[in-house]
Amino acid sequence: MKVTLKYFASLREALGAGGALEWTPAAEPTAAALRAWLRTQSPAHAQALAPGRAVRVAVDQVLADESATLRDGAEVAFFPPVTGG
């Protein structure tokens, strides 16, 4: 499935802006599954998206929890709980 990733604030500083991604989920395509898969992509991803780190998610520009099911073509944004400016 294709998704567009966006990172904001400190996550953007650590991981870059994001972009288009081709992802084949092993099970149901949820935001949590995507976050878990992203952690396997690099040490920076593992640290920035580690379990227990406060990270919010939005799917198609709507705040969601990590159980949100993703659809092909979804925009998924990860950001810290407090962002400025």
Image (cartoon, grey):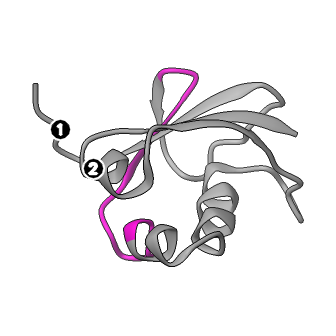
Left or right: residue 69 compared with residue 19: right
Q: Residue at x 38, y 67 (%)?
A: 48
- The N terminus lies in which quarter of the figure? top right
Using the image, determine if residue 23 lies above or below residue 72. Answer: below
| Residue 75 in picture, x, y percent from top left | 62, 28
Q: Is the residue under label 1 in contact with that under label 2 (CB below 8 Å)?
A: yes
| Residue 25 in picture, x, y percent from top left | 85, 57
Which residue in the protein does label 1 denote?
Answer: 83
Query: As shown in the figure, which amino acid type bears the numbered disc 1?
Result: Thr
Residue range of the region highlighted in magenta in the rendering: 48-61
Left or right: residue 43 compared with residue 1: left
- The C terminus lies in which quarter of the figure? top left
In the image, residue 56 lies in the stretch drawn in magenta:
yes
Query: As shown in the figure, which amino acid type bears the numbered disc 2?
Result: Pro
How far apart are the alpha carbons under marks 2 and 1?
6 Å
Determine which quarter of the picture holds residue 83.
Answer: top left
Q: Residue at x 25, y 51 (%)?
A: 10
Using the image, determine if residue 24 lies above or below residue 43. Answer: above
Count neighbours of disc 1 (C-alpha within 10 A) and say few if under 14, some if 14 to 19, many if 20 or more.
few
Which residue in the protein does label 2 denote?
Answer: 80
Which label was assigned to residue 3?
none
